[in-house]
Amino acid sequence: MCDVSLRRAFGFLGKRWNGVIIATIGALGPVGFADLKRAVTGITDSMLSDRLTELASINLVVRSVTTAKPPSVTYALTEEGKRLLPVFDQLARWAHGNLSDCLGGR
């Protein structure tokens, strides 16, 4: 694999919260901001908003606003975002089996 490509991928996906947000939306399906914030323990409103904007800007997440009263906003993975889910699943399996408790695994 290309070292430059891996550095780019981990530079983005390794950015705090990006991978967790993608995986959480993948697990929950289209989700509102408040429900997503509850599911991603420890993230602030501003950080979640910033990360969602960033993920949308590179076409991994789509933001949908309904015209209902009151309007509601949901976030869902794009097809590009969904393509990351098997990678995250494999990474989670590896971490479960190989990282010790002191590193936040098992």
Image: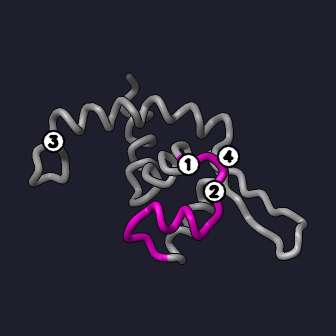
Q: CA distance from mark 4 to mark 1?
A: 18 Å
Disc with the residue nearer the chain's start (3 vs 4): 4
Instruction: Give the number of the disc on residue 18.
Output: none
Q: Nearer the viewer, residue 50 or 86?
A: 86
Q: Nearer the viewer, residue 57 or 84?
A: 84
When the figure is inspected, residue 7 is found, relative to residue 25, above or below; the finding is above
Q: CA distance from mark 3 to mark 4?
A: 31 Å
Q: CA distance from mark 1 to mark 2?
A: 7 Å
Query: Is there CB contact under 8 Å for labels 3 and 1?
Result: no
Q: Nearer the viewer, mark 2 or mark 3?
A: 2
Percent position (x, y) of residue 9?
44, 41
Which image quarter: residue 10?
top left
Are there few (<14), some (14-19), or many (20+) residues within 10 Å of tag 4?
some
Residues drawn in magenta = 28-44
What amino acid type should be assigned to the residue bearing mark 1? Leu
When the figure is inspected, residue 18 is found, relative to residue 85, above or below; the finding is below
Q: CA distance from mark 2 to mark 3?
A: 30 Å
Residue at 52%, 48% in the rendered image: 22
What amino acid type should be assigned to the residue bearing mark 4? Asn
Mark 4 highlights which residue? Answer: 59
Quadrant where the image shows the C terminus: top left
